[in-house]
Amino acid sequence: MDRVRLATVWLGGCSGCHMSFLDMDEWLIDLAPHIDLVYSPLADAKEYPDGVDVALVEGAVANEENRHMAKVLRKRSKVVVSFGDCAVNGNVTAMRNPLGKSLEVLRTSYLLESAGTGLKLPDDREIVPVLLDKVLPLHAVVPVDHYLPGCPPPAARIRAIVEDLLAARTPSRAAELIRFG
């Protein structure tokens, strides 16, 4: 078997899915000979490469930078996995959606709630990407091939889907592997 070019991506979320990925512990040593980790917050790649076989994408699409990254990774990846509840349905990241458009949320957070403290709206686009008015699950922005729910998904679930994808099998949809929570 050729080595699989694996990427893990962190969009709008807490990195809990990546922490759960690391919870696969010793199995990561077994996995290493079968993959090339070509992009990940666990590595130091700056550009998302072409020719990725499998991309595990954590987090919701919350800002313009996330949306751009989602489109790039979809274009350059054969298989995209919506990795964790934020990617699957927006989860905690989408809790700002009922509060209104992004500018309203920022004004409330930075101006009304901090009156008299000297805080101002973040406006340096080089540092703070423009927020989308609504936080979106990954599939609302790009096509997704597989879903891996959980907040975060337990290591055993991650291992199961990675094993299936490495073996070129359709991932199992057994109830214990697709349960939320």
Image (spheres, rainbow, N blue to C red):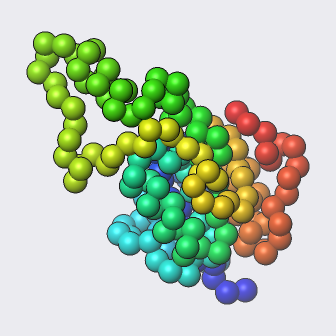
Question: Residue at 88% of width from left, 49% of height from top?
Answer: 174
Compared with 75, 93 (above or below) is above
**Viewer-nearest residue: 68 or 103:** 103
The relative height of residue 72 versus residue 95 in the rendered view (above or below) is below
* Residue 14 visible in rendering: no
> What is the total number of numbered labels drawn onto the structure image?
0
Of residues 113 and 42, the one nearer the viewer is 113
Quadrant including the C terminus: top right
Left or right, residue 92 beside residue 158: left
Q: Residue at x 45, y 27 (%)?
A: 100
Q: Can residue 128 be seen from the camera position used here?
A: yes
Residue 132: horizontal and vertical position, in percent? Answer: 43, 43
Relative placement, left or right, of 151 versus 124 is right
Residue 81 in the image, given as x and y percentages of width and height: 66, 59
Q: Is residue 60 above or below residue 79?
A: above
Q: Is residue 31 left or right of residue 7?
A: right
